[in-house]
């Protein structure tokens, strides 16, 4: 059966509409019935191309997308399943993906996922075994026919047909936050993302910026803009950073607060604002829109789309009505004073250089001397560690290494050190989601979404460490494989010199490729 969502996304003439649905907790509660009622109306209305089903939104326990996706598909509507790595390990994810394909569920929105919230007897354990880059690599390999090591030898499994999207947030305040998002976006497209959906924000210039950045970097995949029908309650939560990654500025909150005093509690204005944003996004070249909101009735979707059609011919006029930037926000491009959007000229990122980190320079020197093949201590260090490996001294040596690196890097003893790729910051101990290939979308003002005011996002810190050396855009240059748990609680130094870690496997792969 032809994938109708994929067909619409690849059709130059179609402006795609998706709507977000939140399953809620339970199996046959009002939340699930409302989702199915919305789906039934959307199917009859014929204006929505896919219904996006969240995976434990906000980190709260919820019905999985699977059963609702199957029911929605039976209605004749297309489900778009949110697929995250936050609650499942890689084995379960692989089985889940093949289950989706067998059920004919081909459309995925691949994301990091929200950190677990308080639930049954406290917080759940965060898993985050695979990040979005890993999942894109995996689903791309599955589409090509995944090679699997069977009992009798290698087996190539039958190809899947996933159409897989991912997310990006252009609504970041700091240069370091924004550039980490964009560098990760480049990798996502290169690793197989078929389309992009933006995170939630209300800054016309930022929406424009993303499209210009993608054009500049030659990223040729369709982009869907997030249009959230924002009421006062949700605006307050987002403005207070209680829904990580969703950006509502002080100016927008003030406007919505004033609108809420009207007899309709601001509904008319928020629907009109949403329609203007749909028209604007279409004018900017977005492939479509992703509509969401707190208990958004389907009738409101019809109104927004109809009104947007009326407003589209005059879309540049709505830029000023959708100009709600954060304070002191960084933009990648220079401002176009005539349109209120951007020019094609990138800003000079050489301004406001952070000071050089002495800690970073020391770590870098030690690495160059002992862990680079040209370093003067590399050969003796390799000989020492190879002699030590697999002896009774290996375990106590690993503990000594761990003690040293706990003091210097908050080491978690993963056995596969990625400090050099992260400006000598440890993602296993200093990223709440253990992300190896770039940040999630939840940072706020540079702070980690989980440790706001206490810990800066590791990728913000890494970017700022690299920038004085002119290496900031090399931050995510190398894509790292997922953590190999067979190396846990072993010496990363011994593993490095014996080519057991990711660096060694990369070296072996390069040698095999040249043979």
Image (spheres, rainbow, N blue to C red):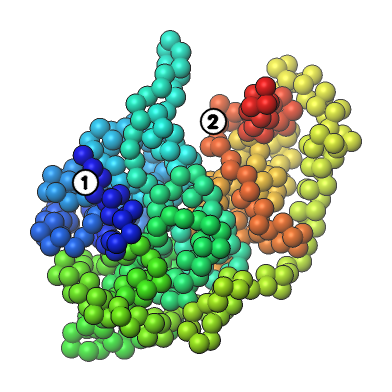
**Residue furthest right as drawn:** 376
Q: Residue at x 35, y 30 (%)?
A: 159
Which of pointers 2 and 1 indicates the residue nearer the eye? 1
Which image quarter is the C terminus in? top right
Residue nearest the viewer, comparing 172 with 79:
79
Q: Using the rendered image of the protein, determine whether residue 305 is visible from the camera's viewpoint.
A: yes
- Please rate how many residues cluster around mark 2, counting C-alpha atoms within 10 Å: few if below 14, some from 14 to 19, many from 20: few
Looking at the image, can residue 25 be seen?
no
Give the residue displayed 38% in from the left and 66% down from the top: 286
Q: Residue at x 43, y 10 (%)?
A: 152
Q: Which numbered circle lies on residue 69?
A: 1
Q: Residue 167, located in which quarter of the rendered image?
A: bottom left
Q: Is residue 101 left or right of residue 333?
A: left
The residue carrying mark 2 is: 485
Earlier residue among tags 2 and 1: 1
Tag 1: Cα neighbours inside 10 Å, few (<14), some, or many (≥20)?
many
């Amino acid at each position: 059966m032809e994938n109708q969502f994929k067909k619409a996304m690849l059709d130059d003439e179609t402006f795609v509409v998706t709507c977000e649905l939140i399953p809620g907790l339970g199996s046959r509660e009002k939340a699930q019935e409302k989702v199915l009622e919305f789906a039934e109306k959307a199917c009859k209305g014929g204006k929505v191309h896919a219904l996006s089903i969240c995976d434990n939104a906000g980190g709260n326990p919820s019905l999985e997308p699977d059963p609702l996706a199957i029911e929605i598909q039976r209605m004749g509507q297309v489900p778009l399943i949110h697929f995250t790595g936050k609650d499942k390990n890689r084995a379960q994810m692989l089985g889940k993906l093949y289950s989706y394909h067998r059920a004919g569920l081909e459309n995925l929105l691949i994301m990091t996922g929200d950190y677990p919230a308080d639930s049954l007897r406290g917080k759940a354990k965060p898993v985050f075994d695979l990040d979005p880059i890993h999942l894109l690599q995996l689903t791309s390999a599955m589409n090509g026919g995944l090679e699997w090591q069977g009992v009798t030898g290698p087996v190539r499994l039958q190809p899947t047909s996933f159409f897989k999207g991912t997310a990006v947030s252009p609504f970041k305040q700091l240069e370091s936050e924004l550039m980490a998002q964009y560098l990760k976006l480049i990798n996502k497209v290169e690793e197989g993302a078929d389309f992009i959906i933006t995170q939630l924000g209300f800054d016309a210039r930022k929406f424009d910026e993303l499209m210009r950045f993608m054009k500049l970097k030659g990223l040729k995949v369709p982009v869907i803009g997030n249009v959230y029908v924002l009421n006062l309650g949700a605006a307050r939560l987002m403005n207070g950073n209680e829904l990580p990654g969703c950006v509502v500025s002080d100016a927008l909150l003030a406007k919505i607060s004033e609108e809420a005093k009207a007899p309709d509690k601001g509904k008319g204005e928020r629907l009109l604002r949403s329609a203007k944003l749909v028209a604007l996004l279409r004018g900017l070249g977005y492939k479509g829109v992703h509509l969401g909101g707190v208990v958004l009735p389907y009738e409101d979707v019809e109104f927004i789309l109809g009104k947007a059609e009326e407003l589209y011919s005059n879309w540049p006029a709505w830029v000023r009505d959708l100009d709600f930037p954060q304070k002191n926000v960084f933009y990648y491009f220079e401002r176009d004073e005539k349109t209120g959007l951007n020019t094609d000229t990138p800003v000079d990122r050489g301004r406001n250089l952070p000071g050089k980190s002495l800690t970073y320079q020391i770590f870098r020197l030690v690495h160059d001397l002992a862990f680079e093949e040209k370093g003067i201590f590399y050969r003796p260090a390799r000989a020492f560690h190879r002699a030590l490996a697999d002896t009774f001294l290996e375990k106590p040596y690993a503990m000594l290494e761990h003690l040293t690196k706990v003091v210097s890097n908050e080491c978690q003893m993963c056995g596969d050190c990625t400090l050099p790729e992260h400006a000598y910051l440890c993602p296993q101990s200093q990223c709440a989601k253990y992300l190896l290939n770039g940040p999630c979308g939840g940072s706020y003002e540079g702070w980690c979404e989980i440790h706001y005011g206490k810990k800066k996002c590791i990728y913000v810190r890494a970017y700022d460490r690299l920038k004085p050396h002119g290496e900031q855009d090399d931050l995510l240059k190398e894509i790292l494989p997922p953590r190999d748990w067979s190396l846990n609680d072993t010496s990363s130094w011994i593993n490095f010199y014996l080519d057991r870690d990711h660096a060694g496997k990369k070296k072996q792969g390069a040698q095999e490729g040249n043979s």
